[in-house]
Image (cartoon, rainbow, N blue to C red):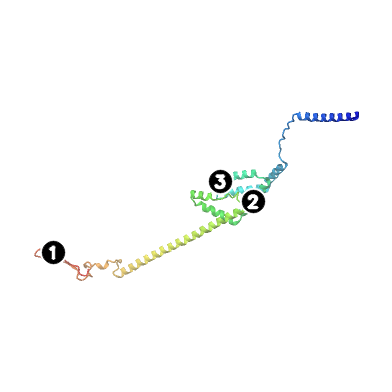
Amino acid sequence: MTALATNRLMLIVAVVLMTCHAHAAVAEEPAVAQTPETPGPKASDESDLARKAEIMNSARWRRAIFELGEWLSNQPLYPAKQVARIKSDFNGRVAKMSSYEVEYLLDDLDAKFKVLDTPEAQEARAWVGQYMSVMSDRKREELLKDVPNVVTMSAGQLSQELEKIEQKRAQLQQQHAAFDQSRGQLVDQAQLSRQQTAQAAAMGRNQGSGGGGGAYSPYGNQGGGKPPFADSHGSGMTLTSGPFGAYVSMSLGNF
């Protein structure tokens, strides 16, 4: 091996040893701990909150909430405690909604207000109020257990509930009409009975006035000293006196 080849081989070995030493030194150095960054609000969340605030500050939203509050104040279904609970639940639901959910809620409220503004809905509300006003407290509580929450139901469900109220109203009207008809028949029968009684009494008075002016009596022909059952021939009672004293003999005859 020439001197030039020997020097080249030694240079290669030296480079390899230096490279290995450098890698070992890097491996022995402790890793620097990195502090995790605190995640900030996403840009999409901030944008949704801004959009939600814009919807809730709009005139359309304020008008819808005002109309909802007016309806809850004037409706005859829910007592004051339940109205307060409905409002609290509504606030909790809105707080958890995204801007798109709030927008959908607003559309749903507008649709329900259109249903509630129809003449059928107004008549149903007036009828329900009148119907419940004559109920006892216990009966009213039993009825309210089955009443759904108008705020949480959809406009379609609200229309179905109004149809149920209309069916109930028609059913009660039919029952009331049948009761009135039955009561009218009883009144007519009682009036006819009074008329027949009055006519019979008048006939009796007329018959009595033809025999001497006195009031009619079925016992009027039994006077004049006639014995009882004078129309029974062969009947009689005889008082006889004999050797053994007085005795009574009675013949029943045809009696």
Q: Amino acid at mark 1?
A: Tyr
What secondary structure is marked by label 3? Answer: helix
- The residue tagged with tag 1: helix, strand or loop? strand
Question: Marks 1 and 2: CB-CB under 8 Å?
Answer: no
In the image, taking residue 255 as reference, residue 62 lies left or right, namely right
Q: Earlier in the sequence, mark 3 or mark 2?
A: 3
Q: Amino acid at mark 3?
A: Gln
Q: Nearer the viewer, residue 188 or 145?
A: 145
Q: Quadrant of the C terminus?
A: bottom left
Q: Residues within 10 Å of mark 2 (few under 14, many from 20)?
A: some
Q: Is residue 96 left or right of residue 142?
A: right
Measured from the top left, where is residue 236 in percent x and y?
18, 68
In the rendered image, which quarter is residue 119 located in?
bottom right
Residue under label 3: 82
Q: Which residue is mark 1?
A: 247
Disc 3 + disc 2, Cβ < 8 Å: no
Alpha carbon distance from label 1 to label 2: 112 Å
* Disc 3 from disc 1: Cα separation: 99 Å
**In this rendering, which labeled residue sits more in front, label 3 or label 2?**
2
Q: The disc labelled 2 sits on which kind of residue?
A: Asp
Quick one: label 1 or label 2, which is nearer the N terminus?
Answer: 2
Observer-side mark, 1 or 2, equals 2
Q: Nearer the viewer, mark 3 or mark 1?
A: 3
Give the numbered dot on residue 108: 2
